[in-house]
Image (cartoon, grey):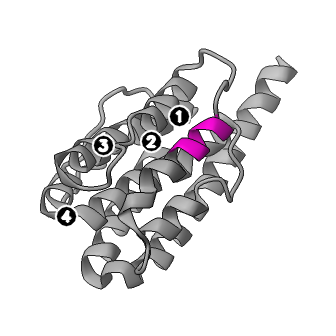
Amino acid sequence: MNLVELLAGADELGLAASGLACLDRCVSLLGGDDEVLRPLWGNLAPGGDPDDWAGLLQQIRSKLDGTPGDDAAVLLVREMLDGAPAERTGEAVRVWADTCSLAALRVHLLLDPTSSTSTVPRDGRTEGLPPLATAELRRQATVLEVVATHGGAGLRRAVDVSTEGRRVLRAVVSRRGRVVRAS
């Protein structure tokens, strides 16, 4: 199943986890550490109160407010955070998950030094895609599949997948910064 089909078939938990996972992998571009989104992950877990989502989201936005720069990748991540719905239910979470999916793939395309494309395929085809974007596509599908299969019990694996992706992206940004400083 391709990413578009996975998103279309996902329930509200899967969609919220997908959007949050995309944001989580990119949050370091906003200066966020590994724990900044942990309260939202906890809110998705069994026993989490959906009514607490808006308050937790506002706290996180406050922590990440004022991220400097007009870099295209940073702006995309800011849009992911700002676009998160106040309620983690209904059509709003579906739109957010889809927006985050596209934005995260664009971020990975922008940051991949081997990228020569701006096309964001989510139909399962990876030919011509640079390695960073291919890995992001795979991570997005994994998060949706694991939550669809295991529900709330799959969130631990979704967090692990996001943590791995965040570390990879952080390394790419660090390397990119060293190359720019050396020029």
Distance from the alpha carbon under mark 1 to that under mark 2: 6 Å
Quadrant housing residue 29: top right
Q: Which mark is residue 114?
A: 1
Residues tagged 1 and 2 counted as in contact (Cβ below 8 A): yes
Q: Secondary structure at mark 4?
A: loop
Q: Which mark is residue 135?
A: none
User: Image point 31% across, 38% down: which residue?
Assistant: 99
Q: Amino acid at mark 1?
A: Thr
Q: Which mark is residue 96?
A: 3
User: Image point 28% across, 58% down: which residue?
Assistant: 15
Q: Secondary structure at mark 1?
A: loop
- In the displayed structure image, the side of residue 35 where residue 87 appears, left or right: left
Q: Is residue 59 magenta?
A: yes
Residues tagged 1 and 3 counted as in contact (Cβ below 8 A): no
Q: Is residue 128 at least partly visible in the picture?
A: no
Q: Position of residue 39 (x, y in %)?
A: 57, 62
Q: Position of residue 126 (x, y in %)?
A: 30, 49
Q: Where is the C terminus found, in terms of image quarters?
A: top right
Chain part drawn in magenta = 58-64
Q: Nearer the viewer, mark 1 or mark 4?
A: 4
Identify the residue position indicated by label 2 in the image. Answer: 130
Distance from the alpha carbon under mark 4 to that under mark 2: 27 Å
